Structures are given as structure tokens and as C-alpha cells.
Image: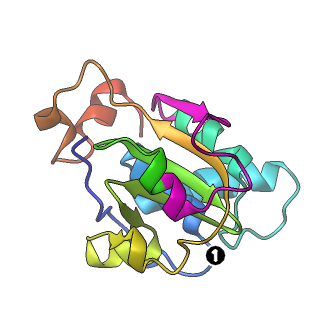
Amino acid sequence: MNLNWKIPGYEKAKGPCCGVISCAIAAQVPFDDAWNWHKVKLKAEGFKRFKGGTTSAHYTSFLEEKGIKHKYLSDVTDFEIGKTTLVQFSGWTAKPDTVYLVTTTGHAQILYNGHVYDQSAVRTGAGVPIHKHWGKLKKVKQVLEILEPEKITHAEFGLPLFDYHNKKGVH
């Protein structure tokens, strides 16, 4: 998948917004787009002040609304939810050239080719190798495999970043 890790508005990614930034990367939308979606959703659910914290339950809804194909990975032969660490999932289960939105204990991140993309990664535009990531030993709670759209070529899905969404009328 040809994704842009340095999403527009990334510099606003401060505080507990790892889920928001992970959703923005997975959907290839600006940070503000993902932030506002979560803010509206959580406010509708009774949260009075949104500061960036999300739950994994919202990620599927967000991806569906943005038209991003994905699948939920539950326990399979080589990893077990709640017992497998992020580094173990990366080494044992994760397929090459496949994007995963992984929820771990208290954190959410994108995992791609042995690199982790979260708030610190989008600032630099480069992922942190899994063996150097501060959260490598966190337990995996949920994994969403982001599926590459069948109708889009790599060239169309690259820069400019939002052509696909603009063609679909999604803003």
C-alpha cells in the first residue's frame, strides 16, 4: 500500500490522540477530519469534553464511514488477543506490505512492515522500528487489517493524498 505517513494537520497531534492519528493514517484523511469525527461521535455518546481519548470500538465505525475496507483479526493460530505483545504480532503474524491498526494496552498505532506509526512517527514522517518502539511489549487488544481498495492503483492512492476521497464525494 502506498500511504502517506505525514498527514495534513499532524502537528496538532498532541495529548491522548493515538486513536485519532491512527484512524487518520488508515483512512488517509487530514488529522482535523479524524479529530472532528471522533469529537462529534463521543459528544453524541455523552462525553462532554473531548480531549482526544478514544476507544477501539470507534475505529471500525470511522473506517466504515470513510469507505475504508478492513477486516477484524481475532485469535488465530499464531497470536492470541490479550496475550501476544505488539512485537510478537509484528514478527509472527503481520504480513509484509499490509497496514494494521493495532490497539494495545492503552495505545493505538499503525503497524506496517515492522515499523510503528503513532504521534511521534507522523511528526518525523518515518516509522519507528518495532524493536525500538517504546510500546513493543504492550499486549495486543484488537487488530484491524486495512485492505487495499481494489479499484485504486498505487499511483492514484499516493499524492495528492485526497483525490480518492474527493472522487467519492467524501470530505
In the image, farthest residue toward the left: 155
Instruction: Give how far across and how far down residue 19 sits, in percent.
Output: 59, 60
- Label 1 amino acid? Pro
Query: Where is mark 1, residue-wise?
Result: 16
What residue sits 45% from the left and 77% below the top? 133
Q: Nearer the viewer, residue 77 or 61?
A: 77
Q: Is residue 81 magenta?
A: yes
Task: State the scheme by which the image is colored.
Answer: rainbow
Q: Secondary structure at mark 1?
A: loop
What residue sits 70% from the left and 69% below the top? 106
Q: Nearer the viewer, residue 146 or 41?
A: 146
Q: Which residues are magenta?
A: 66-89
Is residue 156 rendered to the left or right of residue 39?
A: left
Q: Is residue 51 magenta?
A: no
What residue sits 59% from the left and 72% below the top? 137
Instruction: Give how far across and how far down residue 62 sits, in percent.
Output: 59, 41
Say which quadrant the C terminus sits in.
top left
